[in-house]
Amino acid sequence: MSNEWLETIVVTRRDATARIVVLELVSPDDVELPEFAAGAHVDVLVDGAAGLVRQYSLCGPPHDRARYRLAVLAETASRGGSLGMHRLREGDRLRISLPRNRFSVSDEARRHLLVAGGIGVTPLLAMAHALEARGAEYELHYCARSRTDSAFIDELEHNPHVRLHFDDGPDDQRFSVATDIGRPDPETAIYVCGPGGFMDFVISCARQAGWTAETIHMERFAPVEDAAAHTAGGAFTVRLAKSGGEYEIKEGENVLDVLLAGGVDAPYSCQQGICGECTVRVLAGEPDHRDDVLTDHERADGMFTTCSSRAHSPILELDL
């Protein structure tokens, strides 16, 4: 992994809920931070000694380059990332990467439907700020267990474009794909982010209602539960076009790990199949796409995620 780390300082820290902390970061030199587009995330070096890196969405207004805002949920099964972020205090220094974006606002859509589940509101909040600034037509549907579990309520509940849906609230305010998303419209883009089960439900219901894959945009915060499915299957060989090196990928292994173990300078970041940073181009062979990151168009264009996908063909040649 090659990152250009930016030094930042935690200038504000507040507990938005019992499990969500909101952090605001500024440059120690009091200069503007790099620009970003709504939907972008940054890598955060949570623990430099352990090499622990996690990805968090930028949820502040994209036009505000004086500070970056992150919101982090304390995961019950945290492997150190979210708990490390919750231990931060004002004045602490934090290294982050340049912003990256695989979840951008569509330039082709006339109308935008943002559907957030819990902490999945973070990238969609930045999108709402951007759409508001450009005067675009949008709705943000924020689904959460309860009001007390919801961050950013103070800045959302009086926005006429926002609909709040709480599991413990009256039936008439609960989220419904049929009424809140409605019938397919080729000029409308849907954006979904949140827990895996929530996202699968919204996307499957939208597809059943006739919405096409091209109109649905998504970003996952956690890898699929059946991670073993990424490495199941027979062995195949990866050939690197630039170096000529060949590497056997056995069952139970993934392409990225084998390449890194072989000293190959392959791109990567999260190693969990959710950020898309490991994407490379296939030059020959038939890929077996098992990621949840690439669009159908990107797959047809020859893109391939080394951390989670395999090959149908005996040899897969990559542009590395």
Image (tube, rainbow, N blue to C red):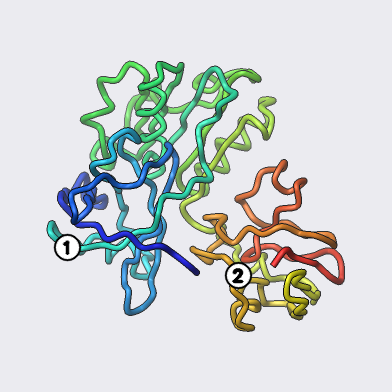
Q: Is residue 308 left or right of residue 112?
A: right
Towards the viewer: 201 or 185:
185
Q: Quadrant location of the C terminus?
A: bottom right
Query: What count of labels does the image hold?
Result: 2
- Please provide percent x and percent y for residue 78: 36, 66
Towards the viewer: 204 or 260:
260
Q: Residue at x 44, y 64 (%)?
A: 3
Q: Residue at x 41, y 35 (%)?
A: 124
Q: Image height check: is 139 above or below 265?
A: above
Identified by mark 1, the residue type is Asp
- Please provide percent x and percent y for residue 76: 34, 62
Q: Image height check: is 159 above or below 206?
A: above
Q: Classify mark 2: residues with Cα within 10 Å, few (<14), some (14-19) or many (20+).
A: some
User: Which one is in front in this view, the residue at disc 1 or the one at disc 2?
Assistant: 2
- Please provide percent x and percent y for residue 81: 34, 65
List the residue tagged with mark 2: 266
List the residue tagged with mark 1: 92
Q: Residue at x 66, y 25 (%)?
A: 209
Q: Classify mark 1: residues with Cα within 10 Å, few (<14), some (14-19) or many (20+).
A: few
Element assignment for label 1: loop
- Which label belongs to residue 56? none
Identified by mark 2, the residue type is Ala
| Between discs 1 and 2, the one toward the N terminus | 1
